Image: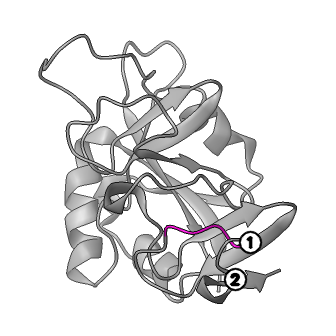
């Protein structure tokens, strides 16, 4: 199993995602907006993978014309510089304006990167959002309902330990319902 990051120019992200989804990976593998130094908007899209068998080989086998760049491990500073610091900032919506974050869209808020868990997301992180971390697991955030519950296999940090949800639609913390979680290294 491999732990790696990858970036791709925005022009090819949709096709690369479609190619990976056709192989059973995804959806929206490349989904972290990023921009090059001096660019006016996001011109790269990134991903980070933790221990998904054969996924690295699938990413490496993408069409060379896509220009995928593999970054080793989770500590490569290029990924953090391109993605976490350059993603779109979350701004409180003032009404039902177009362009509200949809499921999988990412924004930065309070110095952290977040992924929207719901369509037309008007909520301030962490409500309706899940923190994206490059190393380790995001902290447990008490779900408010079905829109932001934890799925089977979701991983979190909680009170200094790491856990994986072993039930679907998990809305309990590891201390509130220990049978819904297993401790992981």
Q: Identify which residue is drawn at 48% across, 68% down.
A: 150
Which residue carries the number 2 mark? 178
**Quadrant location of residue 183?**
bottom right
Quarter assignment of residue 124: top left
Residue 34 horizontal/vertical position (percent)? 46, 33
In this view, 153 is above or below 18: below
Image quadrant of residue 30? bottom left
Screen quadrant of the N terminus: bottom right
Q: Can residue 173 be found in the magenta stretch?
A: yes
Q: Is residue 6 left or right of residue 21?
A: right
Residue 35 pos. (x, y %): 46, 27
In the image, residue 89 sits, relative to residue 14, either above or below, namely above
Badge 1 element: loop
Q: What residue is drawn where x is 37% and y is 31%?
A: 123
Q: Is residue 155 left or right of residue 125?
A: right
Location of residue 57 in the rendering, given as x and y in whole percent from the top left corner: 48, 82
Q: Are marks 1 and 2 in contact (CB under 8 Å)?
A: yes
Image side of residue 140 versus residue 88, left or right:
right
> What percent of the width, then of the height, locates residue 132?
57, 49
Q: Which residues are magenta?
A: 171-175
Q: Which mark is residue 175?
A: 1
Name the foreground residue: 180 vs 118. Answer: 180
Q: Furthest-front residue in view?
A: 176
Q: Nearer the viewer, residue 7 or 146?
A: 146
- Label 1 to label 2, Cα distance in Å? 6 Å
Q: Main secondary structure of the magenta part?
A: loop
């Amino acid at each position: 199993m491999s732990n790696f990051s990858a970036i791709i120019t925005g022009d090819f992200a949709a096709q690369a995602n479609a190619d990976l989804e056709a192989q059973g990976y995804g959806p929206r593998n490349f989904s972290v907006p990023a921009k090059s130094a001096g660019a006016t908007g996001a011109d790269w899209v990134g991903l980070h993978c933790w221990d998904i068998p054969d996924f690295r080989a699938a990413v490496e086998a993408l069409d060379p014309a896509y220009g995928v760049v593999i970054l080793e491990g989770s500590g490569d500073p290029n990924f953090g510089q391109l993605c976490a610091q350059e993603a779109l900032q979350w701004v409180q919506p003032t009404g039902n304006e177009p362009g509200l974050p949809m499921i999988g869209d990412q924004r930065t808020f309070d110095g952290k990167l977040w992924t929207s868990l719901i369509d037309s997301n008007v909520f301030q992180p962490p409500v309706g959002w899940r923190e994206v971390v490059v190393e380790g697991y995001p902290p447990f955030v008490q779900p408010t309902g079905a829109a932001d519950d934890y799925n089977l296999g979701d991983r979190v940090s909680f009170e200094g330990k790491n856990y994986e949800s072993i039930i679907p639609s998990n809305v309990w913390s590891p201390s509130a319902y220990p049978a819904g979680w297993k401790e992981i290294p």
